[in-house]
């Protein structure tokens, strides 16, 4: 079953077409990355799904129902932890957000304790959020979405500014809540390692349009067959790099130009590159097919714009 369906969504801000006729579906219990460079339309898409922006055109369905009639099925954490109350404790925050959704009573108190325990926050439950570490604050923000018990959780940059341990904790929490609790997560982030590790499905936006939507495995496989690494006997000078660039493939110069990574569509193209290296008297030490990572896939899809 689809938890989220976006159908022909379009939104302008005066003359800017922020989102241009996009459609995608997210399966229940999965994690979907909504990715793209700055200004590509991620926030507009996410806010439209949450019903915080009224689109010019298109339909959005949450668990099969129009999103305007299903706002109680979505919760969102925008820009890290901004929607927490900093002068309240984790327990008070959770109580407050549950209260807004009409939840209360002894059962709620039990649920709050259970969720805080799940996130290893029991000993911090009565400490003001302001005095918690950034990683703990992020956990409280995600705990808030669980106490509201919504089917769909939207997260904007959940790992921004976190140390290695907190990054790993948040990653595990997100995987746990989809597998154990069947929650659906829509994740907007520039953290491509996180995307590769936890996303089942990815939607990549560029200039308001979808440039790719597929599952992670397919995207990685699609690019795997096209990326080669050439190790050279010496570093390439600026002049030689420019000569190679004229061949108009996607070149990435690594290790000061002593290693080249190339994205090619046809294996025969590798001979043209070898020929050019021969012409400029550069010896090749090794050529191998590269294990592709998602960051490279993303860069190819968005014309090299990381953020
Ligand atoms: N309230 C607004 N008024 C006018 N233009 C806007 C408004 N909000 C967004 N835009 C424009 O719409 C386009 C898409 O913006 P959006 O914030 O959706 O992109 P984004 O992918 O979330 O970017 P970022 O990664 O920088 O947060 C951009 O050109 C942006 O300048």
Image (cartoon, grey):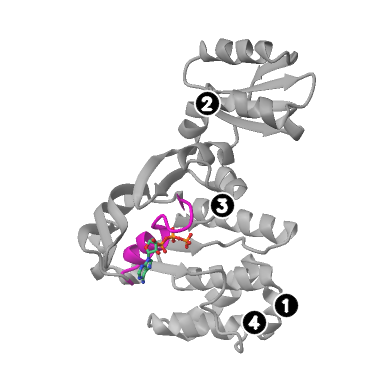
Between the C-alphas of marks 3 and 1, the distance is: 23 Å
Locate residue 163, reporting x and y percent: 73, 61
Residue for badge 4: 129
The CA distance from mark 4 to mark 2 is 50 Å
Please provide percent x and percent y for residue 6. Answer: 29, 53
Q: Which residue is mark 2?
A: 249
* Between 28 and 278, the one nearer to me in the picture: 278
Residue 242 against residue 203 in the figure, above or below = above
Near-viewer residue (106 or 96): 96
| Front residue of 62 and 44 | 44
Q: CA distance from mark 3 to mark 4?
A: 24 Å
Cβ atoms under marks 4 and 2 closer than 8 Å: no
**Coordinates of residue 250 in the picture (x, y in percent):** 54, 30
Nearer-N-terminus badge (4/1): 1
Mark 1: is the Cβ under 8 angstroms from ligand 1?
no
Q: Nearer the viewer, mark 4 or mark 2?
A: 2
Q: Which residue is mark 1?
A: 123
Give, as a single range, the part of the protein colored magenta: 34-52
Which residue is drawn at the image coordinates 67% and 64% (left, top)?
161
Picture layout, residue 269 above or below residue 196? above
Residue at the spot x=62%, y=32% of the render?
252
Q: Which residue is mark 3?
A: 175
Mark 3 or mark 1: name the one nearer the start of the chain.
Answer: 1
Task: Indicate whether 272 appears above or below 152.
Answer: above
């Amino acid at each position: 079953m689809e938890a989220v369906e976006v159908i022909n969504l379009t939104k302008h801000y005066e003359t800017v077409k922020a989102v241009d006729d996009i459609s995608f579906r997210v399966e229940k219990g999965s994690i979907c990355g909504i990715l793209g460079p700055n200004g590509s339309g991620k926030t507009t898409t996410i806010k439209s799904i949450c019903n915080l922006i009224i689109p010019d055109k298109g339909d959005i369905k949450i668990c099969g129902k129009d999103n305007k009639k299903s706002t109680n099925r979505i919760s969102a954490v925008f820009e890290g932890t901004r929607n927490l109350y900093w002068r309240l404790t984790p327990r008070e925050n959770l109580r407050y957000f549950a209260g807004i959704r009409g939840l209360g009573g002894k059962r709620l108190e039990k649920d709050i304790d259970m969720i805080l325990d799940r996130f290893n926050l029991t000993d911090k439950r009565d400490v003001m959020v302001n005095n918690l570490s950034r990683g703990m604050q992020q956990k409280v923000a995600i705990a808030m979405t669980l106490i509201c018990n919504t089917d769909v959780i939207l997260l904007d940059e959940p790992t921004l500014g976190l140390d290695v341990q907190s990054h790993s904790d948040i990653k595990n929490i997100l995987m746990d809540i989809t597998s154990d609790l069947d929650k659906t997560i829509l994740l907007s982030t520039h953290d491509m390692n996180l995307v590769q590790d936890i996303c089942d499905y990815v939607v990549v936006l560029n200039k308001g349009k979808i440039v790719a939507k597929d599952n992670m495995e397919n995207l990685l496989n699609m690019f795997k067959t096209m990326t080669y690494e050439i190790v050279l006997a010496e570093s390439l000078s600026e002049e030689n790099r420019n000569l190679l660039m004229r061949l108009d493939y996607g070149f990435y110069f690594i290790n000061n130009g002593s290693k080249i990574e190339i994205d090619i569509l046809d294996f025969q193209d590798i001979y043209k590159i070898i020929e050019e290296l021969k012409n400029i008297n550069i010896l090749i030490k090794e050529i191998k097919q590269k294990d592709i990572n998602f960051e490279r896939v993303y860069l190819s899809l968005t014309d090299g714009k990381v953020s």
